[in-house]
Amino acid sequence: MVRFSPNSLPSVYKFFSARFIPVRAAGTANIRAMNSATAPEAAPASELGSGHQPAGRGRILAWAAWDWGSAAFNAVMTTFVFTVYLTSKAFGGEDEASAVLGTALAIAGAAIAVLAPVTGQRSDAGGRRKLWLGVNTAAVALLTGLCFFVFPRPEFLLLGVTLIALGNIFFEFAGVNYNAMLAQISTPANIGKISGFGWASGYLGGIVALLIVLQLFVQPSIEWFGASTQDSLNIRLVAVFSALWLLVFAIPVMVAVPEVPTARQDKLGFFASYGLLARRIKAIYRTSPHTIYFLLASAIFRDGLAAVFTFGGVIAAGTFGFDLKQVIFFAIFGNVVAAVGALVGGLLDDRAGPKAVIIGSLAGLLVAGTALLILGNGTYSFFGISWSGSMTFWVFGLFLCLFVGPAQSSSRAYLARLAPSGETGELFGLYATTGRAVSFLAPALFTLCITIATPLVAPGQAQRWGIVGIMVVLLAGLLVLLPVKAPGKTDIAVVPSR
């Protein structure tokens, strides 16, 4: 088992930077309209191909550090620790608390879908992408830290879910600006590699943060005041730790990555921004329709990718009989495998293109999912070797993790290649909006398949058929993606400035 500690972080980054981060080049020629094969001088340029100097290793490490730190909010607060605390009996019962949390997160998702494109648009127009990354990250850290005051009593449930929901909103806003920065620190030759490195940093950062939380707070290996369970002090201190973790690893990108030079534009009113957004969406569809097609396709398959992690632990416990300790161990190994997949996928992205990587990853996910569905928790004998249900989940579950990373990483790199110069934030805002718009698909189909299977199979066997729902979403995303042109064959959109 690979072990990480805070003292090992520099060596981890040094190891990966030596292999996956390009050395600063002496200079590059101005690349105009890299995606047009007909009239390169006349076509508009993407931000990626706008001729900026390649970023050095330090700047790329600084950018990826934000991904590393953000895992404290994703993995610790919203997935494994704090939301589990909020839905415990201390807050009035699992069912009631879960319903309140689900409602709050649904409202947050709607707010993100409505507001994300405009927040990206306004940060692009003002040339303050980094500033708003810092503001939104600080807001997430503050809201996370305030979770310390959520005591284990029912009257604090509303406070807790409100803080988590608001944190999700500001986290998505920060993510829009962070993803847009990818185009300014990479070139057409290395964007896949850098995007993969960022995703891998997030996966590994989540592992390290979880291990620290487990060792110091949840199952402390040493006696100290933070280990006290009185009034759930140990869990509430996890919120403080997560806030500090996020802030510390957000500092490098704020120091090392500059703002994008841009001509300041007159301020546009909030509601007028939506009029401009509508005009730009029409212009993108008219001048680069395959950009819109990719947004739609990626929204579908990204929902399936999210479901792999959302329901992976549920299936491990309910179908394959894993206990909590086994689920946590699988989560750790799964994140390591996903990080490796993101790194390898990034290298392939720069050589074969993001579309090929995404298609290959989705195909791999469908094969692994089919194996889990067919084999289930049964015990088999192959050539005299016993094969248990636990072995089935470890092998094919890790294969699922292996293919999730490249699909996520290449999806981000795909869109960055298509972003018109100066409009990357707005396009990634649409990326967030389309993702939120279909985020009900995989959970709904997962539930529907279980409901249909329940009266048809033996008790305890229906949950496995929920895998079909996830696979349907992944297959739908793959089929919608197939006719979409690769970035190298797609024109950069021409959008109005006002």
Image (spheres, helix red, strand yellow):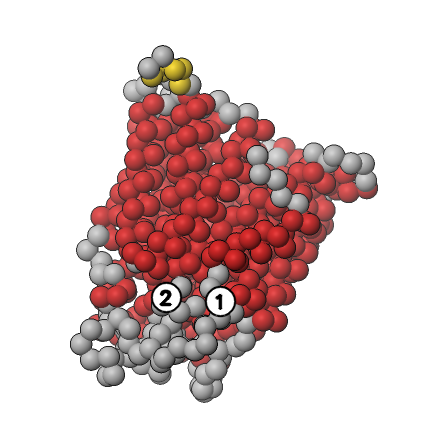
Q: Position of residue 241 (x, y in %)?
A: 69, 50
Q: Residue at x 41, y 42 (%)?
A: 402
Q: Nearer the viewer, mark 2 or mark 1?
A: 1
Say which quarter of the image contains residue 368.
Answer: top left
Q: Residue at x 72, y 40 (%)?
A: 216
SS for dot 2 = loop
- State whether residue 460 appears in this view: no
Disc marking residue 23 = 1
261 w.r.t. 100: above or below: below
5 w.r.t. 282: above or below: above
- State whether residue 348 appears in this view: yes
Disc marking residue 189 = 2
Task: Looking at this view, name the residue that lies furthest to the top.
Answer: 384
Q: Position of residue 382 (x, y in %)?
A: 33, 16
Q: Nearer the viewer, residue 207 or 151?
A: 207
Say which quarter of the image contains residue 88.
Answer: top right
Question: In the rendered view, does 5 fall on the left or right side of 415?
Answer: right
Q: Residue at x 61, y 62 (%)?
A: 250
